[in-house]
Amino acid sequence: MIGRDWELPGQRRFIEEIRDHLERGDQLTIAVPARTDTRRLAECVRRATPALAFTVLSAARLCTGTAEPVEALLTALHIAVEPGAVPSIQHLFVAPELAGLVVSVDGVHEINEDARTRWGTFLAEYADVSRRLSSAATVPGQIVLVVNGDPAGVDASAPGWTPLYWWGRLDRLDVGVFVHRTRPSLDRVVQSCVVEIAGFDLALAETLAYEHADDPERTVRVLTQHKHELLHAWSEPRVRQTWCSADAPGSLTDSWACGQVDRFDGENRAYWHSCMFVDEARTTTIRRRIWVGQVRSILPRPEEWRVLVIEEAKAAGFIASGINIDELEFAALHDQLRKGQRDPARARLAEFAGWLRHTRNRISHLDLVDERTRRDGDSLAIAALRGS
């Protein structure tokens, strides 16, 4: 859902935040929603921090058998322990093999609950010892957990350990850039609708870029199919919460982990995935999101055109030059132009002013403006404004 390349502005900021924490010597849990390519993420982090040495380990392989986390790490990193000694955290800190190394543990979501609990206990202790040694000559190795889904049980809260969530990282600009790269020729109004409907789900945005996302019926069909592909990870949330915190999913973690909800475009209002509303009566939420997309992309245009129509009408003498632009809102402008002498130029301006009036009213009353109506507006603008 996050995308493959991690090249969008919001994605790059997330990578840079991880880099900054690593360069400060922090221990990290990086939590991303399920179905995210965590190996790709780890590779992007590695490229962003060329001064640090990385090794990537699989949590599933580390947790085979009954070995405790310390013993598993010592074995995986080929750190020898003197004969007869009991492996301990101290062995990790004195081992030259680990000094200055970033150990990225991937696939924590694949291990069982008992193993996750043991790792959580170990990580809290590791963070505490690492923090106390941070001013000593020894450079403690850093551990990064990459969790695909809910980090429950391994999200260490001890001082010295920082959890970073992929939460609220995308905004409308990110998704708009992504949709434009996916299909540069896409109509700007449809692109705006795609952004509003897809929200934080880039996979859905990619699909909608090739559909008529300004058509509620077709959009619902696409969302229904998309929901079938996600159902294996989804269950109905117990509480469909409206507001959310800025830094972490909190009580929404379960729903966030499976891709049902996220914080979007910097708002503290939880953005629930559009697929959650395909069975809603009259598909009200989906229609409203399409409407918002149209408002953002269409609404500024009629106002610009209204000013141009007034200027054209003044130049042609159809409106007194002394009339202020603010005095001629859409209805007044239309009425002014359709009353008076018959003239082809005046008739074209009046027809266009009528289109502006009715289109503006439709948007104001939560109605959608279909593609044919939008094309009619473009044609009328060309005919009436003569390229101005």
Image (cartoon, helix red, strand yellow):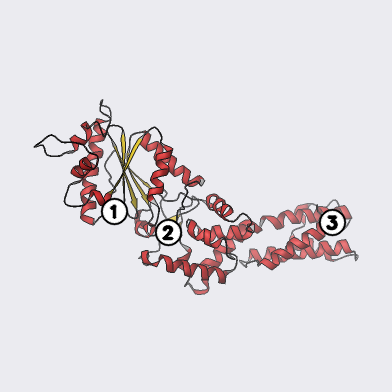
Residue 249 image point, x, y percent = 38, 53
Q: Mark 1 = which residue?
A: 152
How many residues crowd mark 1 within 10 Å: few (<14), some (14–19), many (20+)? some
Give the CA distance from mark 3 to mark 1.
66 Å
Q: Amino acid at mark 1?
A: Ala
Residue 23, by quadrant, is top left
Q: Amino acid at mark 3?
A: Ala
How many residues crowd mark 2 within 10 Å: few (<14), some (14–19), many (20+)? many
How many residues crowd mark 3 within 10 Å: few (<14), some (14–19), many (20+)? many
Residue 247, can we see it?
A: no
Residue 242 image point, x, y percent = 43, 60
Taking the view exactly as shown, the residue that stands out farthest to the top is 137
Q: Earlier in the sequence, mark 3 or mark 1?
A: 1
Q: Mark 3 = which residue?
A: 313
Q: Mark 2 = which residue?
A: 261
* Numbered disc in front, either 3 or 1: 1
Taking the view exactly as shown, the residue that stands out farthest to the front is 78
Could you say which is closer to the camera, residue 172 or residue 61?
61
Residue 377, by quadrant, is bottom right
* Numbered disc in front, either 3 or 2: 2
Asked if marks 3 and 1 touch (Cβ < 8 Å), the reply is no
Residue 93, by quadrant, is top left
Q: Amino acid at mark 2?
A: Val
* Label tally: 3
Q: Is residue 338 left or right of residue 97?
A: right
Q: Is residue 197 left or right of residue 309?
A: left
